[in-house]
Every structure is written in structure tokens, then in C-alpha cells.
Image (cartoon, rainbow, N blue to C red):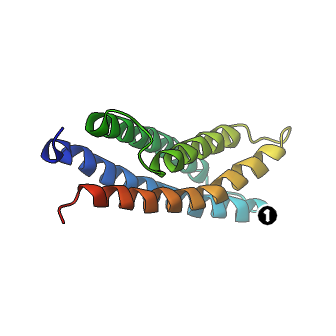
Amino acid sequence: MDLPSFLWLWRFAAWSMGLSLTAYGLLAISGLILWGDRRHQRPRPPWLAPVHRTLGISLVVLVLFLLAIGLIGTLGYYGSLGHSWHLPAGVTVVLLVLTSAWSGWQIHPKQPQMRRIHITCNLLLALGFLAVSWSGWTVVQKYLPP
């Protein structure tokens, strides 16, 4: 396929990535507030946990959408996958987001290790987002005119 027919796909990807990074940042802020309230044994605002969960669900949906865009775009343009390190970086981010969401949902007093898994995944996710952003930028450069 020709680049102009894929332009709408790249726009969706750019917006989705921007929204994913925004959701990740807001999740980090709300997570730090939840952690601070728990650490200092303060009552948490009743709206905070539902907002944190909603942002987490949004991040899952956005990252899965980005994976679909990448697969469709790469298969449509090249006819196969694995042309750059963007695919393994993206799949790693998807796995980290899914693991973070799963472990976050499992946090309760009977399974305190889930909180550690959740936080570790989120810290690794910062590195994953850096890698996928960098590799994505190098992929986009292939399609821009010289």
C-alpha cells in the first residue's frame, strides 16, 4: 500500500500514543496519592480509586489499540512482521500493561505481593514506554519524505 492511504492510521497511532502516555502519567500521579494515603494512614478520597481503575482500563484499551494499529500497518505495508525492534518493544509494553492491570485488580490484604508486582510493572513500564517511543520514532522516519 501507498503512504497516503496509511496516513489516517499513523494519525490514530500518534493520538493513541499521546493519550497512552497521558493516562500513564495520570495513573502515576493517582497511584502516588493512593500510596501516600496508605502509607500515612489517611482516608483516601472516595473518587480516587475509581478514577485510578478507569484510567487503568483506558490504558489497557489504548495499548491494545496501538498493537492492532501496528500489526495492521506493518502487515499492510510490508506483508510481514519483524522489520524493526518496535514490535518486541510494543509487545513488551502490552504485556507489562496487562500484567499491571491484572495484578492491580488482585491487590487485597490476602495477597500483598500483588501490590509489589503492580508497582514493579509500572516502573518497568516507564522504560518500556521510552523504548517504544524511541523505536516508533525511528519507524516513522522510514515513511517521511527525505
Q: Is residue 58 left or right of residue 7?
A: right
Q: Is residue 130 left or right of residue 137?
A: right
Residue 38: x and y in percent read 76, 59
Image quadrant in which you'd find residue 135: bottom left
Residue at image x 39%, y 53%? 17
Q: Is residue 116 left or right of residue 110?
A: left
Residue at image x 25%, y 44%? 9
Image quadrant in which you'd find residue 33: bottom right
Counting the numbered discs, the total is 1
Residue 145 in view here:
yes
Residue 53 in view here:
no
Residue at image x 58%, y 61%? 126
Q: Is residue 97 left or right of residue 142?
A: right
Residue at image x 52%, y 59%? 131
Residue type (three-letter) at the residue carrying disc 1: Arg
The residue most toward the right is 110
Secondary structure of the residue carrying numbered label 1:
helix
Residue 66: x and y in percent read 40, 43
| Quarter in which the N terminus is drawn | top left
Residue 139: x and y in percent read 35, 55
Is 25 rendered above or below residue 4? below
Residue, disc 1: 39
| Quarter in which the C terminus is drawn | bottom left
Is 131 rendered above or below residue 86? below
**Frontmost residue, 52 versus 22:** 22
**Frontmost residue, 27 versus 85:** 85
Crowd rating for badge 1 (residues with CA inside 10 Å; few <14, some 14–19, many 20+) = few
